Image (cartoon, rainbow, N blue to C red):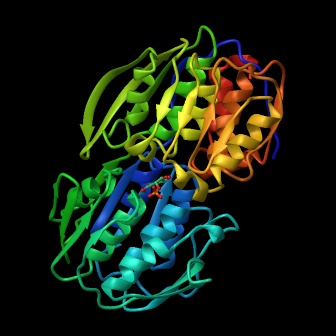
Amino acid sequence: MQQTVRPAGRLLGSVALPGDKSISHRYGMIASLAEGVSKIQNYSTGADCHSTLGCVQSLGIEVEKEGTSVTIHGRGLRGWRSPSSDLDAGNSGSTIRMMAGLLAGQPFTSRVFGDESLSRRPMARVMKPLTQMGARFEAREDQFPPLTIHGGELHPIDYTLPVASAQVKTCVLFGGLFAEGQTIVREPVRSRDHTEIALREFGADLKVIQRVITLEGRPTLTGRELIVPSDLSSAAFFLVAGLLIPESHLIIRNVGLNPTRSALLDFLMGAGAPIKVLKIESVNGELIGDIEVKHAPVRGGVIEKDMAAALIDEIPVLAVLGAASEEGLVIRDAQELRIKETDRIATVADNFKRMGIEIEVTPDGMRIPGKQKFRAAAFDSFGDHRIAMAFAVAGLRGDGPSTIDNADAASVSFPEFWNILDQAAGSNA
Ligand code: S3P
């Protein structure tokens, strides 16, 4: 699908976004291993989170969907059944990596595959700790999907993560659910902690002391009612669009504000963005609030070290903001960008060139001078949802209509993106 984006006059109104992708995956997976029924409201509409539901259904779990509400009939920690066919993770790195931990603890062999992009993403980072716990794997070239997982009796490990990755942390903790005794995960940098919060919500005994997480194995997880906050990483596109387009004023409702995710707000406010958090409450252990943004120039800055890990999903759209900022944006220590749905350093740079934006690419990041003029262009998402949406935002500021090829990639996390953008921009977009 090709999408046209016209320069926007201003973005106005109050927007409601789909449920958080990271939290939806975790609730979907854990609920399927809990005893009894879980009702999840505002479950992500993104294709990725539906890949997770498809996998748990293939493992014999009944799932009912009604709008954005999902009901999961969990059958306990030992309730999955050997699947009769391979499990399809689609485009979803979270599905394959987190499910690997759960499948490693099963008394059967399973095989998980994905689309072309997922088939190029490295899995050794989850195979290594799970092998130490007692599982066995086969993978294409020993590291790429399809992944065959020979599950079995797991034993607990004390594992120091070599990379800051919430997916790998989750995978080890999920393996630890099936191991008798304490599984310990040590993080180099604090990554998103939705797994820790969700496991506790479902009744697991889990302790966090600074960057060390200790999980007691073989808990009884109990089904429950949950509400998923709206996705801050999806809100990022509207926050940046609001900042970029003169006279914009947006309120984004019920957004997840978990402190391990909200570095985006810290970065933007630190760069002078007039962003306000209007109300905060705690729902199922996760913070939720409304965010207000108004148009204003921002300074730009440097994203590096721990900040690079904390902002990894938002970097494509922050790069777009950086090109319009007063002082430009430097991104370092973000080599993980190269192994996302696309090599996001390369795909950002490619689209920047199409619109005449200057960028210097480095092995672990990019340097983007500020105050650049945005020209209309023919963009390509290269099949990557965050690239599609980041360059839609760039197109709003263009000097004429822009097009985005493979724009349907946005559905991976945010199928409503084009409609909501259209509404916020009135008849302009
Ligand atoms: C995610 C963790 C991050 C992030 C991804 C979702 C999660 O990946 O980029 O979009 O839900 O745990 P890594 O764990 O590879 O950093």
Find residue 348 and report its horizontal and vertical position in percent: 68, 42
**Quarter of the figure with residue 232:** top left
Find residue 111 and report its horizontal and vertical position in percent: 55, 84
In the image, taking residue 188 as reference, residue 50 lies left or right, namely right
Find residue 344 and report its horizontal and vertical position in percent: 63, 49
Q: Nearer the viewer, residue 391 or 76?
A: 391
**Quarter of the figure with residue 129:** bottom left
Find residue 377 and report its horizontal and vertical position in percent: 83, 31
For the C terminus, the quadrant is top right
Q: Residue at x 43, y 73 (%)?
A: 126
Q: Nearer the viewer, residue 247 or 358?
A: 358
Q: Residue at x 82, y 42 (%)?
A: 2
Q: Nearer the viewer, residue 59 or 109?
A: 109
Q: Kindly tell me whether residue 62 is visible in this rendering.
A: no
> From the viewer's perspective, is residue 54 above or below residue 345?
below
Q: Residue at x 33, y 71 (%)?
A: 172
> From the viewer's perspective, is residue 267 above or below residue 294?
below
In the image, taking residue 2 as reference, residue 119 lies left or right, namely left
Q: Kindly tell me whether residue 221 is visible in this rendering.
A: yes
In the image, taking residue 43 as reference, residue 6 lies left or right, namely right
